[in-house]
Image: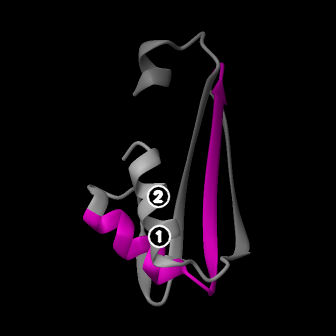
Amino acid sequence: IIAERFPQALVIAADTTVYARGHILNKPRDSQEAKWMLETLSGISHSVFTGVSVIYEGQEITKSEKTTVRFALLREEQIEYYIKTQPI
């Protein structure tokens, strides 16, 4: 939509999502969901998918990448501290 409204503009868009233990994890809606996600990721390897699109003068290039990330085993106090200090 932005590229259509501004056809002369360089438009770059990107997003990331996580897949772990059979769940797709997007951005948490609240601190309770953030806690559940961090507990789910704690101590395991999971997949992180990132997609990027670039549009310029009617040409579009879209790419994606999958990365495997391993989380350390998180203690309860680490999870609580992170949730308190990060915007959700």
Which residue is depicted at the point 41% across and 72% down?
37
- State how far apart marks 1 and 2 are (Cα): 6 Å
Residue 60, percent from left and from top: 65, 36
Q: Residues within 10 Å of mark 1 (few under 14, many from 20)?
A: few
Q: Is residue 47 above or below residue 31?
A: below
Magenta region:
32-57
**Label 1, on which residue?**
77
Residue 42 in the magenta stretch? The answer is: yes
Which residue is depicted at the point 35% across and 75% down?
36
Q: Is residue 44 above or below residue 82?
A: below
Q: Amino acid at mark 2?
A: Tyr
49 and 5: which is toward the camera: 49
Q: Amino acid at mark 1?
A: Glu
Q: Residues within 10 Å of mark 2 (few under 14, many from 20)?
A: few
Mark 1, secondary structure of its residue: helix
- Colouring rule applied to residues: one colour
